[in-house]
Image: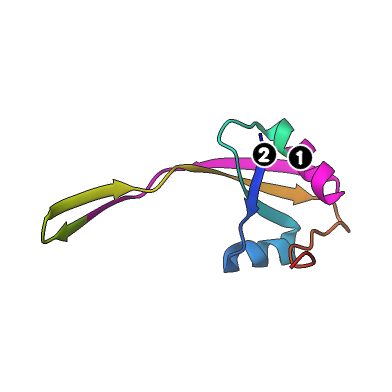
Amino acid sequence: MSILIKPVITEKATTDSELNNRYTFVVDNRTNKVEIKKAVEATYGVSVEKVRTMNVRPDRKTRYTKTGVVTGKTSAVKKAIVQVAEGDTIDFYNNI
């Protein structure tokens, strides 16, 4: 089971990482804060001070087409905001 799915690279998450040393990841829905902390420390070699998690609800969408009403939804995800110790950084762009 892969705990860290992908990092969130948006404008808000990037400014939060530059100013406050907090990085955002999309994680597996079944993991807890302790598992997320161990995974980030093992993967990136940094010391984690605090982990905040949030469950993001699925977005429901309805489209009106020629064949009728089509409804659907996106999948629910779990995000983790990880605060790293002062002086440690995570570089997402070095593996590109």
Amino acid identity at mark 1: Ala
* Residue at image mark 1: 39
Q: Start and end of the magenta stretch?
A: 37-62
Give the x, y percent position of residue 62.
22, 53
Q: Identify which residue is drawn at 82% across, 43% down.
A: 41
Query: Are dots 1 and 2 in contact, CB under 8 Å?
Result: yes
Residue closest to the eye, 71 or 79: 71
Give the x, y percent position of residue 74.
39, 48
Residue closest to the eye, 71 or 17: 71
Q: Identify which residue is drawn at 77% across, 44% down.
A: 40
Give the x, y percent position of residue 9.
62, 63
7 sits to left or right of 43: left
Residue 19 part of the magenta segment? no
Residue closest to the eye, 22 or 77: 77
* Residue at image mark 2: 3
**SS under mark 2:** loop
